[in-house]
Amino acid sequence: MNFYIMTLFPEMVMNGLDTSIIGRAIHKGLLSIEAINIRDYAFNKHNSVDDYPYGGGAGMLMQAEPVYQCYQALSEKIIAGKAEEAICAEQGVDSETPVTKKPRVIYLSPQGRTFNQTMAEEFAKEEDLVFLCGHYEGIDERVLEEIVTDYVSIGDYVLTGGELPAMIMVDCISRLVPGVLHNDVSAEFESFQDNLLEYPQYSRPEVWHDKRVPEILLSGHHANIEKWRREQSVIRTAKNRPDLLEKAELTEKEKELIVNLNS
């Protein structure tokens, strides 16, 4: 999977992502992550990409043209790469019939849909994803209308730029790419799967600070363990994130359990 991040701070993005699980996946060739500096497409000698907003107001606004030129160059690069891959794979694409599908562009903004695991699963199906990181007071609306396909927020609060949200989304989506996690099953049974929080987990030693690991986990009875874990997920969700239960598929017994917890 290929991630492209249009940003004013490429070092910040790459230093954060080229580590741990994501870093190993990059070096194995499972992921490709590239940060593109929007300043490289500035059209003045000072490499300035911002200006005062029309109508007044505090702060500066990122101009449309540098963002657009950055996007155009990136889009052409992606399309050219797809055409070359198709030719090499002998899929019947020749130089006179170029691949023209443009990439999906995600703008990180509080105005967007709030990012969640379902959205991560949707984005993970894409081969190429482009993230556009705003800064200052945002980006000229005209270029957003022209290139953005998805507006996404990571929460109802304000950050100084879109770099951290982009990194969070790349991390989350990457975990769903086959081979990125050592145990692919763990990507399927984590928090928010089936709209339930993950059950509590334990490791050695069996007793720590006078607290014992639940006996059921030591029993070796896998069916009972799975039943216990499911019950704990329901209980934890009901206590900490009851809003998630509205979309969860629960049995009658689990619904009764929640009623008893709240009574």
Image (tube, grey):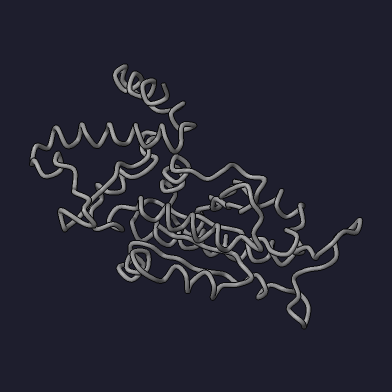
Front residue of 240/37: it is: 240
Front residue of 159/75: it is: 159
The outermost residue toward the front is 210
Q: Position of residue 156 (x, y in %)?
A: 63, 47
Q: How many marks?
A: 0
Q: Position of residue 160 (x, y in %)?
A: 66, 63
- Position of residue 149 relative to residue 80, above or below, is above
Specify the quadrant of the image occupied by residue 236. Answer: top left
Q: Is residue 157 toward the left or the right of residue 202 in the image?
A: right
Q: Position of residue 56 (x, y in %)?
A: 90, 59
Q: Is residue 203 toward the left or the right of residue 95 in the image?
A: left
The outermost residue toward the right is 55
Front residue of 197/178: it is: 197
Front residue of 251/209: it is: 209
Q: Position of residue 252 (x, y in %)?
A: 32, 16
- Position of residue 186 relative to residue 232, above or below, is below
